[in-house]
Image: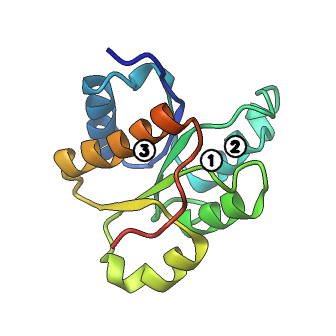
């Protein structure tokens, strides 16, 4: 039985993909600390307590961000840039969810720092493994994992 849970922010505009993520998070016992936003602008507002999230605790951040790249309003890469530029969010682990071939975006994403990526349609087992690895790191070390790009 898990003793520590951590907050997960899902930035995903596709309802089918979000439902699959919710199902897997439920299976591994992490659904209770989950929040979904549907576009890049909302993600930035949530993270930095702006707009409709201005009453959110400005010092509380998710322990993991699952980030789609092809988002309405603000592209996922710009969201990632905002996350990495802010000292309060720069070390939050980010798993990219993308329909694009990772090789097409490798240089830009590696430069910004990602922890992992999952191609869509999402393979449930790969997704479960990626989230579990980060969760175990948090559990045992109590700090975020080093930001590295996975290949």
Instruction: Give the number of the mark in front: 2 or 1.
Output: 2
Of 13 and 59, the residue lying toward us: 59
For marks 3 and 2 on the same chain, the one whose residue lies earlier in the sequence: 2
Q: Which residue lies furthest to the front in this view?
A: 141
Residue 95 position, x and y percent, is 44, 55
Q: Can residue 36 be seen in this view?
A: no
What is the CA distance from the residue labelled 3 to the residue labelled 2? Answer: 20 Å
Viewer-nearest residue: 26 or 12: 26
Q: Where, by quadrant of the figure, is residue 16 drawn?
A: top left
Instruction: Give the labeled residue for mark 3.
Output: 134
The residue that mark 1 highlights is 43
Of the residues tagged 3 and 2, which is closer to the observer?
3
User: Going 52% across and 29% down the picture, which residue do you hit?
Assistant: 6
**Apparent side of residue 49 relative to residue 106 in the rendered image (left or right):** right
Q: Which residue shows up at 45% across the image and 65% down it?
A: 70
Q: Disc 3 and disc 1: Cα gap in Å? A: 21 Å
Cα distance, mark 2 to mark 1? 6 Å
**Residue count near mark 3 (Cα–Cα under 10 Å), binned few <14, some 14–19, many ≥20:** some
Q: In which quarter of the image is the N terminus?
A: top left
Query: Is disc 2 surrounded by few (<14), some (14 to 19) or many (20+) residues within 10 Å?
Result: many
**Residue 47 image position (x, y, % from top left):** 70, 43
Q: Position of residue 55 (x, y in %)?
A: 81, 26
Helix, strand or loop under label 3: helix
Image point (57%, 46%), residue name:
144
Circles 2 and 1 in contact, beta carbons < 8 Å: yes
Work out whether residue 37 or residue 138 is closer to the camera in this orientation and state it: 138
Asked whether, in this view, residue 79 is left or right of residue 57, the answer is left
């Amino acid at each position: 039985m898990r003793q520590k849970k951590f907050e997960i922010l899902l930035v995903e505009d596709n309802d089918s993909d979000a439902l699959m993520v919710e199902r897997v998070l439920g299976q591994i016992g992490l659904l209770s600390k989950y929040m979904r936003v549907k576009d890049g602008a909302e993600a930035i507002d949530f993270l930095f307590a702006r707009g409709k999230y201005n009453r959110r605790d400005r010092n509380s951040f998710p322990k993991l961000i699952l980030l789609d790249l092809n988002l309405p309003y603000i592209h996922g890469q710009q969201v990632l840039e905002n996350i990495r530029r802010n000292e309060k969010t720069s070390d939050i682990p980010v798993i990219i969810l993308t329909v694009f071939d990772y090789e097409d975006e490798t240089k830009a994403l590696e430069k910004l720092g990602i922890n992992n990526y999952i191609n869509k349609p999402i393979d449930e087992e790969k997704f479960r493994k990626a989230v579990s690895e980060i969760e175990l790191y948090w559990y045992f070390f109590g700090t975020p994992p080093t930001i590295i790009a996975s290949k």
